[in-house]
Amino acid sequence: MKPILPCLALGGLAVAAPAQSYYDLIEARNVSRPYASIFEVEAGAIGTMARDENPSVGLEDDISWDGHVYFRDEAVGSRRGTLEAYAGRDGIFAGFTDGKLVGDDTLTRIEVRARPWMFYRDGYYRGDALVQNGFYDGRDIEGYLGFGREAQQGLYIELGPYYRKYDFSRSDITAPTFTLPDDYSAYGVRLYLEQNTVQVDRRRGMPRDGYSITLVGEREWNDSDAVFGHPILLTKLPSAVWRLRGRLEWYIPGSDAATWEIFANGGWHDERDRVQNFEGQRPIGDRWADAQIRLRLQLGDSMTLTPFLHGQFSRVLGEDGITATKDFFLGGGAETYVHFSESMSLHGWYSFLDNENRPSIRVDEDVRGQHMFYLGFVLRFGASRR
């Protein structure tokens, strides 16, 4: 049967594949995992270098810690449900899936998600510089209940309600004239469409061919009623907003030792959604995209090297708060894994992007730069392959 959607993510397919991330877990729905059970720990140092240091807006040269813990067990309780849990600098996640609770080939999914260390960058671009209206800190926690099933071969559909709580606070770099959003609650409904045709090289345990895609739609209502923002651009959230997101992973074999990879994600949000449109861990704006073209090179049996080109797009309201600017950013880097055994790997990467809006390397303050680098170890315990 021909695919209906074109591509998404299979992070962590095998010992040689990338480690798990918070984003993988909240966006990917029903993809295959290499291990029926595993406890994974990654720890290392992450650093950043700014092209022009400016601590008053978070642009600094600095080094901090990074890593995560990840747990998965597909045989929980007498019903043999699947339990997953994750905690890292990017977020905290716990999820349980059960294929027997409702029956009739319907998968029930219960999730709790939290982002204790969020940084919001309400601002605009003036040339290459990101100018703040107000950069501030935030936290959110969410509960989600989803029901999904395979509509036809390769196409998975899931729908469910969620409830989220937002909290905000000033930071050392928040402009004194900026009024924070009020803490508020939100609830909504979320729809997932996911299709997967990825094929795995069973000799190496790596994605080799095919694609996987996830499309996500949200309709959200909130109880926020306060005015916030810069004094000349005060606004408040509408009572309801909509969001569309997508994520792609596409693998194209080049030779026995080389595989092209295309990773992309993006979103189209309600222009009035001024809080989520300025989340700093991704391109800001009501329309955004982030993509990499990668060439994964297999160097022997225990090492991979993946150089990549990186591009981003942001559509964001300009300095006047009325007209929007469209900004493009380019960069590149490389990622490598060295596998000492199935239970231990060395993981490192370097990345440059000509964008002042990059993820913070710290949890206690917003610190970033155009250059980023990381080096750490991945340890796996109790890994049981399928």
Image (spheres, rainbow, N blue to C red):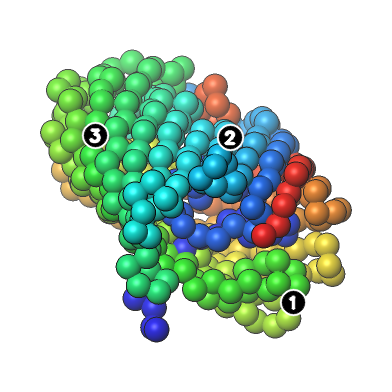
Vertical position of residue 58 compared to residue 152: above or below: above
Distance Cα–Cα, label 3 vs label 2: 25 Å
Based on the displayed image, in which of its 4 quarters is residue 52 positioned?
A: top right
Q: How far apart are marks 3 and 1 (CA)?
A: 47 Å
Task: Provide the secondary structure element on which disc 3 rests.
Answer: strand
Q: Name the residue under label 2.
A: 88
Circle nearer the N terminus (3, 2): 2
Q: What element carries label 1?
A: loop
Tell me if I can see residue 227 in this picture: no
Q: In this view, does 10 lie to the left or right of 255?
A: left
Q: In which quarter of the image is the N terminus?
A: bottom left
**Residue in front for this viewpoint, 113 or 332:** 113
Whether residue 364 sits left or right of residue 183 in the image: it is right
Rendered residue at 46%/17% (across/down): 172
Q: In which quarter of the image is residue 154?
A: bottom left
Specify the amino acid type for callout 2.
Gly
Whether residue 150 is visible to the viewer of this picture, yes or no, is: yes
Is the C terminus in the top left, top right, bottom left or bottom right quadrant? bottom right
Q: Where is residue 243 in the image (x, y as percent from the top left)?
A: 26, 49
* Mark toward the start of the polypeptide (3 vs 1): 3
Q: Name the residue under label 3.
A: 187
Q: Which residue is drawn at 55% across and 39% down?
A: 77
Q: In this view, does 132 lie above or below 217?
A: above
Of residues 173 and 242, the one drawn nearer to the viewer in this rendering: 242
Across and down, in percent, residue 210 comes to 53, 75
Q: Are marks 1 and 2 in contact (CB under 8 Å)?
A: no
Q: Which residue is drawn at 51% across and 45% down?
A: 79
Amino acid type at circle 3 is: Tyr
Give the numbered dot on residue 300: none
Determine which of the numbered discs, if any, sits on residue 257 in the image. 1
